[in-house]
Amino acid sequence: VQLVESGGGLVQAGGSLRLSCTASGNIRGINDMGWYRQAPGKQRESVATITNLGSTQYTDSVKGRFTISRDNAKNTVYLQMISLKPEDTAVYYCNADVRSRWYTDEIYWGKGTLVTVSS
């Protein structure tokens, strides 16, 4: 299974970006999906998660600014980010809890996409 992120880049404070992450490979279904981020010198943190039924959770610092969504038919999760702040600068990683065709469950990570917010 591979997870490939896209949509990162450089944006000014107050701007917007939309991240996408698509899973491919030996997939019967995907349970939870999520976005995590790691800023320089900091630990990786959860940003937002979404269940296969669409229930979402957000870390407090992004509530009201970020929206996670998914397209189950495309095995894709999105992160719409608005009102970006310099402190949102980080490498953003996609995460998926994948059920294989043989009914085994495993968590996979993408390689990350860099988001840089300039002040």
Image (cartoon, grey):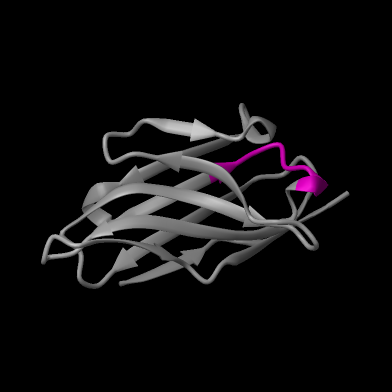
Q: Along the line of sight, which residue is nearer the eye, 7 or 33?
A: 33
Q: Give the vertical position of 76 relative to 65 (above or below).
A: below
Q: Along the line of sight, which residue is nearer the eye, 105 or 6?
A: 105
Quadrant where the N terminus is found in the figure:
bottom left
Q: Is residue 97 left or right of residue 8?
A: left
Q: Quadrant of residue 93?
A: bottom right
Q: How many marks?
A: 0
Q: Position of residue 115 (x, y in %)?
A: 68, 59
Q: Give the vertical position of 5 relative to 73 (above or below).
A: below
Residue under the image location 37 percent in, 56 percent down:
96
Q: Quadrant of residue 114?
A: bottom right
Looking at the image, the residue that sits furthest to the top is 64
Q: Quadrant of residue 40?
A: bottom right
Q: Is-magenta flag for residue 90? A: no
Looking at the image, the residue that sits furthest to the right is 119
Q: Is residue 98 left or right of residue 84?
A: left
Looking at the image, the residue that sits furthest to the left is 102
Residue under the image location 61 percent in, 27 percent down:
64
Q: Along the line of sight, which residue is nearer the eye, 100 or 93?
A: 100
Q: Is-magenta flag for residue 86? A: yes
Q: Position of residue 68 (x, y in %)?
A: 47, 40
The residue range painted magenta reads 80-87
Q: Is residue 103 left or right of residue 53?
A: left
Q: Position of residue 32 (x, y in %)?
A: 35, 46
Residue under the image location 28 percent in, 58 percent down:
98
Q: Along the line of sight, which residue is nearer the eye, 46 or 65?
A: 46
